[in-house]
Image (cartoon, rainbow, N blue to C red):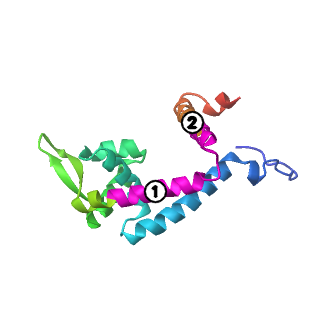
Amino acid sequence: MRAKPRHRSRIGLPFETSFGHLVRSIHRRQAELLRARLSEDGVSLGCWYFLRVLWDEDMISQRELSLRTGLNQATTRTAVDRMEAEKLVNRIHDPKDRRKWFIRLTVRATVLKPTLIGFADDLNNKILKIVPKTAQMDLLLYLNKIHDHLRSLAVDSKTESGIDKLT
């Protein structure tokens, strides 16, 4: 347990220079816009992330869907239940292993793909509009590098303090 300081000092990390705060704020605002548009077609934001994976590769196992979204299997099961209720997917038993389920897109989900992907692409373009094209490529490159670096820190933190790698 950490000892509490006797007096409060000012924290030297203003929101406008906090990477985590800015990324979270940007994500929340983008998600609000996306949620509003998805709801017009009766699709929840929670289902969106799973649909993105399934639109890239349909008929994958529920376990593989969990792995690709980075969410636990209980969360995936709940989302698949919801997508099934919303007539976006069907579950199909693996004929070789009855414990294994494959998730298959319905015609409804397939028909929605061009519209919803098109909206998401337009939204991304509008968000990045204020950034010059060459800088957009650099921004995405560095965000991917940060993403991969954070993933390696998470893996390292299981064996040692991953935060030590930041220095």
Q: Secondary structure at mark 2?
A: helix
Can you give x and y, in whole percent of width and height, for residue 68 in the image? Answer: 38, 42
Up/down of 133 relative to 38, above or below: above
Is the residue marked by circle 2 packed among few (<14), some (14-19), or many (20+) residues within 10 Å? few
The disc at residue 129 is: none
Q: Residue furthest left?
A: 95
* Mark 1 → mark 2, Cα distance in angstroms: 19 Å
Q: Say which residue label 1 marks.
A: 120
- Tell me the residue that label 2 is attached to: 141
Relative to residue 110, is residue 4 drawn left or right? right
In the visual, does 20 lie left or right of 32? Answer: right
Q: Quadrant of the C terminus?
A: top right
Amino acid carrying label 1: it is Ala
Magenta span main SS: helix
**Residue at image point 22% right, 60% down:** 107
Labels 1 and 2: the sequence-earlier one: 1
Q: Residue, x 27% and y 66% (percent of image)?
A: 85
Q: Position of residue 152 (x, y in %)?
A: 54, 31
Please tell me which residue is depicted at 57% across the width and 36% down the height of the picture: 141
Residue 17 percent across, percent down from the top left: 75, 48
- Element under disc 1: helix
| Highlighted range, magenta | 113-142
Above or below residue 148? Residue 47 is below
The question of residue 119 being in magenta is answered with yes
Tag 2: residue type?
Leu
146 is within the stretch colored magenta: no
Whole-percent x and y of residue 37? Answer: 45, 67
Q: Quadrant of the N terminus?
A: top right
Q: Is residue 157 above or below residue 94?
A: above
